[in-house]
Image: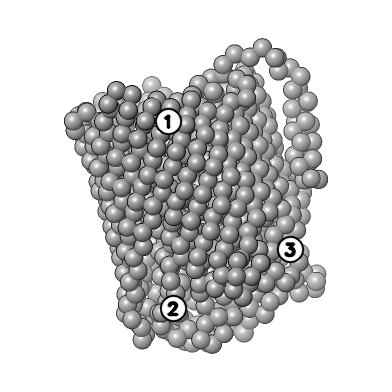
């Protein structure tokens, strides 16, 4: 618990131990009122109060983000209790893990922006740099199987939906930041609303040398959202964005490098890089009819290109990958009230097409080209029945089919079809609720899991993984301004897809199904407090993972800490000054690929950050002090092909300062 004491000590130093000023007589705080009205769209694809969802839902709003030290979405999620591994130390590469999936966490967590899926159909997973923080209205985190029913593949661990801002009053904003590692960031935005129109647009530029050698990154982003409401029965929304970055890849430092005297900032891959270009467009049409019924149609297109160079023992690899995605999602919502009884039925479909074109050159195999395709067709129905004003019963079902085709090498096309369902019960009173749910989920192999680039063949034996998930929990208020939530879960997975470094036809590694089941079970606890200017919170996750049967029987899943704690404490003065501190403790965990649990665990670590923020009229200033105790740690580590441990060192103490100017708001 030494790490926890660091968090507490820093909080007392920063706030001067002023908790004694909190009086026993408390009136209902504004924050509690907001919580009672808080809604979430991720849980049903329609807006509904969080208190009526049979799940451990977390909502992170724009104000909470602004008061944190987070520079990007993964860092926001880390402070909210998720396990986040920083790979590059340059705000570019992260693995976000919900429910303990370790190395394959990105393939088991569905991430969306305004309901648009941003998971890639290949192993690259989610690119977290696509949405700058200043465009975010709120982030919704929905653990468990409910997301699979509504959104399909990749949601085994849960769903994260990022909701972007729309305009209100006419407003412009510009911001500039400077910090350690020669980090420069500038952004500008403009938003507004008038009559039937509302919009928000922004542009961001980031340039940083990064913490390590060859971890430099230069990124440019442009995004815009437009909403048109021509009548009470019609709503149209349009959005689009463009991202481009050039980033160095420092790679891992092997234990042998560290033993030979390598510094944490060093790299043995000075020429590795990844250049990315990504753009998307999305449109949505919603028609309202009768009393509470509606039809919505979403269309989206995305094209992403990555040029990458990687060196390794005895050779190198250069790849140019282009992937296009088209998605169509229609749905109907029927809602009728019969006295105190209310029923909402949502039914629809998701249709998506992926095409990946790859040109590779390896010093071992020479030049090669591939064309991989995947088509998904899914249908779902979700029903929420309010038996009384407090008691809700819910259930859902989904059918989905995936078809794969490959134009290169000797292989057969692949076809899979899966079903999933869920049931839940929820009793809510104000912000308090108690719930239980059970559901099933599935995950299909991504394109470059099912295709073997060594011998140009499809992995004919690779199967989709299937999971069963049960959750029981409650949320309630202790005193005015204070809430407490607890959730107990158990997730069992059959045929889990993982990377076996010794698998494949030549022993060079392959993606396979585990020959034993995996079990993840644990408890999540969250406490939040808001009274006058005081803001505090803490989240604790205890998780046990185990492989049941097969070659790795009784082993724990690599890169999953058994214990994780996040905490924050802050005070907002009437003069516009905010002082805050937050900390994260991550327990020890086995190295990536150590399924035999044969090596020592990677060390636990505690990172504590502090923030000073001051708003004066139309100007805002902040200074972030990150890792104030200068913790020496690596949040990510694994075994290489020769079973030598390697680590990705994380940034030491660093500082970031910035200023924001806002104009208008009329």
The first of marks 2 and 3 along the sequence is 2
Label 3, residues with CA under 10 Å away: few <14, some 14-19, many ≥20: some
Q: Residue at x 51, y 49 (%)?
A: 470
Label 1, residues with CA under 10 Å away: few <14, some 14-19, many ≥20: some
Q: Residue at x 73, y 17 (%)?
A: 21
Label 2, residues with CA under 10 Å away: few <14, some 14-19, many ≥20: few
Residue, disc 2: 461
Residue, disc 1: 391
Numbered disc in front, either 2 or 3? 2
Q: Residue at x 36, y 47 (%)?
A: 396
Residue, disc 3: 601
Q: Residue at x 66, y 37 (%)?
A: 538
The first of marks 3 and 1 along the sequence is 1
| Image side of residue 590 versus residue 451, left or right | right
Residue 126 visible in the current orientation: no
The percent coordinates of residue 542 (x first, y second) are 66, 48
Between 141 and 189, which is closer to the camera in this rendering?
A: 141
The percent coordinates of residue 567 (x first, y second) are 67, 38
């Amino acid at each position: 618990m030494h790490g926890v004491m660091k968090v507490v000590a820093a909080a007392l130093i920063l706030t001067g131990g002023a908790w004694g000023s909190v009086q026993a007589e408390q009136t209902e705080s504004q924050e509690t009122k907001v919580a009672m009205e808080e809604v979430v769209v991720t849980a049903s694809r329609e807006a509904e109060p969080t208190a009526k969802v049979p799940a451990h839902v977390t909502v992170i709003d724009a104000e909470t983000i602004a008061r944190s030290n987070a520079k990007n979405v993964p860092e926001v999620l880390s402070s909210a209790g998720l396990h986040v591994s920083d790979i590059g130390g340059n705000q570019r590469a992260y693995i976000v893990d919900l429910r303990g999936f370790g190395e394959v966490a990105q393939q088991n967590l569905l991430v969306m922006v305004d309901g648009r899926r941003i998971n890639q159909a290949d192993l690259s997973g989610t690119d977290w740099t696509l949405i700058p923080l200043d465009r975010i209205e709120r982030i919704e985190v929905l653990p468990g199987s409910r997301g699979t029913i509504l959104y399909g593949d990749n949601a085994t661990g849960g769903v994260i939906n990022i909701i972007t801002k729309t305009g209100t009053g006419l407003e412009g904003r510009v911001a500039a930041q400077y910090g350690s590692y020669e980090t420069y960031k500038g952004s500008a935005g403009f938003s507004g609303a008038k009559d039937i129109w509302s919009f928000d647009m922004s542009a961001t530029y980031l340039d940083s040398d990064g913490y390590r050698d060859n971890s430099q990154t230069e990124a440019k982003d442009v995004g815009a959202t437009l909403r048109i409401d021509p009548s009470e029965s019609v709503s149209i929304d349009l959005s689009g964005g463009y991202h481009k970055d050039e980033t160095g890849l420092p790679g891992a430092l092997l234990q042998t490098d560290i033993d030979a005297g390598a510094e944490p900032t060093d790299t043995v891959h000075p020429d590795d890089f990844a250049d990315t270009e990504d753009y998307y467009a999305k449109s949505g049409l919603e028609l309202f009819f009768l009393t509470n019924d509606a039809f919505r149609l979403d269309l989206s297109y995305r094209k992403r290109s990555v040029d990458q160079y990687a060196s390794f023992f005895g050779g190198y690899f250069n790849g140019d990958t282009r992937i296009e995605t088209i998605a169509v999602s229609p749905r109907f919502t029927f809602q009728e009230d019969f006295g105190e009884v209310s029923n909402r039925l949502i039914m629809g479909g998701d249709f998506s097409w992926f095409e990946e074109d790859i040109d590779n050159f390896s010093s071992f195999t020479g030049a090669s080209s591939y064309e991989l395709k995947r088509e998904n067709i899914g249908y779902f129905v979700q029903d929420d029945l309010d038996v009384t004003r407090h008691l809700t019963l819910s259930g859902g079902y989904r059918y989905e089919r995936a078809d794969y085709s490959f134009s290169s090498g000797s292989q057969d096309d692949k076809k899979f079809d899966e079903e999933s369902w869920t049931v839940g019960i929820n009793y809510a009173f104000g912000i308090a609720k108690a719930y239980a749910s059970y559901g099933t989920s599935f995950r299909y192999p991504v394109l470059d899991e099912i295709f073997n680039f060594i011998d140009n063949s499809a992995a004919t034996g690779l199967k989709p993984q299937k999971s069963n998930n049960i959750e029981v929990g409650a949320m309630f208020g202790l005193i005015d301004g204070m809430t407490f939530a607890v959730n107990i879960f158990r997730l069992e997975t059959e045929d889990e897809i993982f990377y076996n470094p010794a698998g494949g036809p030549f022993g060079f590694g392959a993606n396979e199904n585990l020959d034993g089941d995996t079990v993840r079970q644990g408890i999540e606890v969250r406490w939040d407090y808001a009274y006058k200017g005081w803001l505090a919170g803490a989240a604790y996750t205890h998780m046990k993972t185990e492989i049941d049967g097969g070659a790795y029987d009784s082993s724990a899943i690599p890169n999953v800490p058994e214990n994780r704690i996040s905490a924050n404490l802050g005070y907002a003065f009437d003069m516009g000054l905010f002082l805050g501190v937050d900390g994260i403790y991550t327990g020890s965990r086995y190295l990536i690929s150590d399924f035999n649990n044969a090596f020592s665990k990677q060390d636990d670590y505690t990172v504590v950050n502090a923030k000073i923020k001051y708003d004066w009229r139309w100007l805002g200033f902040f200074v972030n002090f990150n890792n104030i105790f200068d913790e020496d740690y690596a949040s990510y580590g694994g075994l290489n092909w020769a079973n030598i441990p390697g680590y990705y060192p994380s940034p030491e103490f660093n500082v970031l300062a910035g200023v924001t100017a806002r104009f208008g708001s009329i």
